[in-house]
Structure formats: C-alpha cells, structure tokens
Image (cartoon, rainbow, N blue to C red):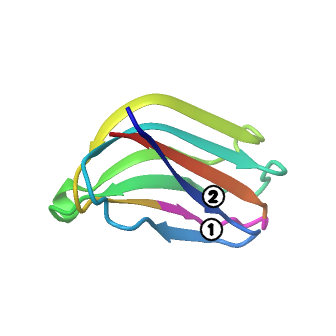
C-alpha cells in the first residue's frame, strides 16, 4: 500500500484551499490539524470533498470551531472515504486570529 500526504499551511492567513484533482482512486485515511496557538475567535474550519460528479455529490468531511475548546490539535483516523479520479479536497477557514495552522490530509491507494 502506498501513502500520499497533501499538506496545507496557513502562514497566519485565511485558508481557501483546493487540492489538484485526484489522478487515481485513493482512500482518505486521516486528517491532522495543528494550530500553533489555540484560536479564541469563533469560526469553523471545514474539510470537504469536491466531487467530480458535481455539487449534489460534494461532501463535508469535517467541521470544527477550534475556539470552542481552545484546541491546538485534531487527529482524525480511519476516515476510509473513497476519493475518485477527478475529485478534489478542499479546506476553508477564515482564521480570524491569524494563527499558523498545519493540515495534513493522508490518503492511500
């Protein structure tokens, strides 16, 4: 089994990221999110699947407001979501506190 890692880093700015379309079928296995300092201002971070079939098949994979619990890290494992050829993964977060955020999206084939 081969593993693939897609990374997103905020640099203290808002995140509005769309991955390149998948070139082969893969399985989303895990998502890690790390904040350098816990956010204090409300705002949701959202990870979604942008399906190549169209908007009716788009799927919100994960949504969290890290200010709710003063989070600095999230680890989601065993997601096991098929990601088909042409699908894209998106990450959106307004980052109202200008925090540095590192996100890893782990896939396997």
Magenta region, mostly helix, strand or loop? Answer: loop
Of residues 80 and 73, the one nearer the viewer is: 80
The reply to whether residue 67 is in sight is: no
Residue 53, compared with residue 4, is above or below; it is below
Q: Earlier in the sequence, mark 2 or mark 1?
A: 2
Image quadrant of residue 10? Answer: bottom right
Q: Residues within 10 Å of mark 1 (few under 14, many from 20)?
A: some
Q: Residue at x 62, y 68 (%)?
A: 94
- Residue plotted at (32% across, 38% down): 81
How much space separates mark 2 and mark 1, taking CA atoms? 7 Å
Q: Residue 74 — which label?
A: none
Residue 32: percent from left, percent from top = 60, 41
Name the residue nearer the viewer: 67 or 1. 1
Residue 99 x %, y %? 78, 61
Mark 2 Cα-neighbour bin, 10 Å: few <14, some 14–19, many ≥20: some
Which residue carries the number 2 mark?
Answer: 43
Quadrant of the image containing the C terminus: top left
Magenta range is 91-98
Asked if the residues shown at circle 2 and circle 1 are in contact, with their CB atoms under 8 angstroms apart, the answer is yes
Residue tagged 1: 94
Res 95 → quadrant: bottom right
Residue for point 84% across, 50% down: 37
Q: Relative to residue 103, is residue 46 drawn left or right?
A: left
In magenta stretch: residue 105: no
């Amino acid at each position: 089994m081969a593993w693939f890692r897609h990374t997103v880093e905020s640099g203290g700015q808002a995140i509005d990221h769309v991955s390149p379309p998948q070139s082969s079928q893969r399985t989303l296995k895990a998502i890690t999110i790390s904040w350098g300092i816990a956010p204090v201002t409300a705002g949701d971070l959202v990870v979604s699947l942008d399906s190549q079939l169209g908007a009716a098949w788009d799927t919100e994979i994960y949504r969290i407001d890290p200010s709710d619990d003063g989070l600095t890290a999230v680890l989601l494992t065993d997601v096991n979501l098929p990601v088909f050829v042409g699908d894209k993964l998106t990450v959106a977060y307004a980052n109202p506190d200008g925090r540095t955020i590192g996100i890893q999206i782990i896939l396997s084939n």
